[in-house]
Image (cartoon, rainbow, N blue to C red):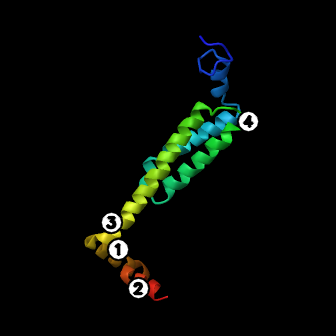
């Protein structure tokens, strides 16, 4: 077993207990950030949800560090999960917009839905924006 001044986390080690103490505000903040980061990954197919949750997870993970010289294990996982969530969210959003603008079938579906919801087609909205 490592000594208490070693940076490795063992069960009877002070650093392990410090990293898993749920009463410590830094640990609970890092744990919450990890959960938000984990939720951001499967929610990437709902517009902006994974981007927002992943961004909040990254910020909370950075805030959980406080004055410590290293990140807690939960904060490291939150940074990874949050970054994956943000990247996936932007990837899904960009591919969706690209598909709508390039695929005629989806463009027609969007025009039909836009006419039903707004009374004007998506193409007419784009023409109106270009004329301004």
The residue positioned farthest toward the bottom in the image shown = 131
Residue 112 quadrant? bottom left
Asked if residue 100 lies left or right of residue 24, the reply is left
Residue annotated with mark 3: 99
Asked if residue 68 lies left or right of residue 49, the reply is right
Q: Earlier in the sequence, mark 2 or mark 3?
A: 3
Eyeballing the image, is 62 above or below 106?
above
The answer to whether residue 119 is seen in the rendering is no
Mark 1 Cα-neighbour bin, 10 Å: few <14, some 14–19, many ≥20? some
The x, y position of residue 24, in whole percent, is 71, 32
Q: How far is disc 2 from disc 3 in space, using C-alphas? A: 19 Å
Residue annotated with mark 2: 127
Say which residue appears at 66% left-offset and 22% top-offset. Answer: 15
Q: Earlier in the sequence, mark 1 or mark 2?
A: 1
Say which residue appears at 57% left-offset and 51% top-offset. Answer: 55
Dot 4 lies on which element?
Answer: loop
Q: Earlier in the sequence, mark 3 or mark 1?
A: 3
Asked if residue 128 lies left or right of residue 77, the reply is left
Dot 3 lies on which element?
Answer: helix
Residue annotated with mark 1: 110
Residue annotated with mark 4: 67
């Amino acid at each position: 077993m490592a000594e208490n001044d070693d940076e490795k986390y063992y069960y009877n080690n002070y650093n392990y207990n410090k990293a898993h103490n749920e009463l410590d505000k830094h640990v609970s903040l890092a744990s919450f950030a990890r959960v938000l980061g984990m939720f951001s990954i499967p929610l990437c197919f709902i517009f902006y949800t994974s981007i927002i949750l992943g961004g909040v997870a990254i910020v909370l993970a950075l805030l959980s560090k406080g004055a410590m010289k290293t990140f807690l294990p939960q904060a490291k996982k939150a940074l990874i999960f949050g970054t994956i969530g943000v990247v996936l969210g932007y990837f899904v959003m960009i591919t969706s917009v690209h598909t709508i603008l390039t695929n005629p079938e989806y463009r027609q579906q969007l025009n039909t839905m836009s006419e039903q919801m707004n009374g004007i087609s998506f193409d007419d909205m784009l023409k109106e924006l270009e004329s301004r």
